[in-house]
Image (cartoon, coloured by chain):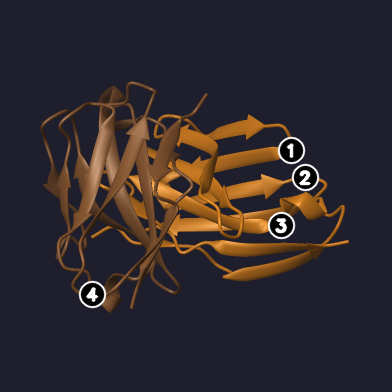
Chain colours: A brown, B orange
Amino acid sequence: NAGVTQTPKFRVLKTGQSMTLLCAQDMNHEYMYWYRQDPGMGLRLIHYSVGEGTTAKGEVPDGYNVSRLKKQNFLLGLESAAPSQTSVYFCASSYYLGQTGELFFGEGSRLTVL
Amino acid sequence: KQEVTQIPAALSVPEGENLVLNCSFTDSAIYNLQWFRQDPGKGLTSLLLIQSSQREQTSGRLNASLDKSSGRSTLYIAASQPGDSATYLCAVRDDKIIFGKGTRLHILP
């Protein structure tokens, strides 16, 4: 079972460049999330989606955009990358089930912005 | 605002010992609490999920308890092994999912 798959796993960008991270899940989950993980800061929610065609802002949304055109995919975009966006990005998904669904994570995407 | 705290930030334990990891949260109105482990450079692996109506969950050598009234959860690891070395995170779910910063566990051979 693939579970939650993130691509790419590693990327180096120059300041001002753009890129898109792709998250795909094969568990038919309604909810999908994008987190960033930084030393000393823990995991912080960037954006999330409660279903196909919906997106919402999390704790640290500035500088990022997302789209959920298909239920199984959740895309995270950086329009103009900044060094402060150097981080490890994790995608996660869960069932809704009245808010009680178990959360599953991808392996992460390590982004460096020079 | 929900806050999740894990103390200590790091812990070293000799192999074979039983140990307890702690997770505390400030708002008891949660839907569930989930424990994860994270190996260096890897994603988070789900260990146990405790619903708000449950008191504990068990999987193999792991046992997680939940006391909503006191805002506490513990993860008990029995007969620790070097392979248990990892960072353990807890996350509580109310309207959002809030993570603690984790406890780095090192099992000494």
Q: Which residue is mark 3?
A: B85
Marks 1/4: CA distance?
44 Å
Chain letter of the residue carrying label 1: B
Residue A103 image-quadrant placement? top left
Marks 3/4: CA distance?
34 Å
Please indicate, yes or no, whether residue B14 appears anywhere in the rendered image. Answer: yes
Of helix, strand and loop, which one carries label 1?
Answer: loop
Image quadrant holding the C terminus of chain B, namely bottom right
Question: Residue A36 placed where, x, y %?
Answer: 34, 60
Which of labels 1 and 4 is toward the front?
Answer: 4
Q: Vertically, is B50 above or below A82?
A: above
Which of labels 2 and 3 is toward the front?
Answer: 3
| Res. B61 mark | 1
Chain letter of the residue carrying label 2: B
Of pointers 1 and 2, the one earlier in the residue sequence: 1
Q: Which residue is mark 4?
A: A82
Of helix, strand and loop, which one carries label 2?
Answer: loop
Q: Vertically, is A38 above or below A59?
A: below
Of helix, strand and loop, which one carries label 4?
Answer: loop
Badge 3: how crowded within 10 Å, few (<14), some, or many (20+)? many
The amino acid at mark 3 is Ser
Image quadrant holding the N terminus of chain B, namely bottom left
Badge 1: how crowded within 10 Å, few (<14), some, or many (20+)? few
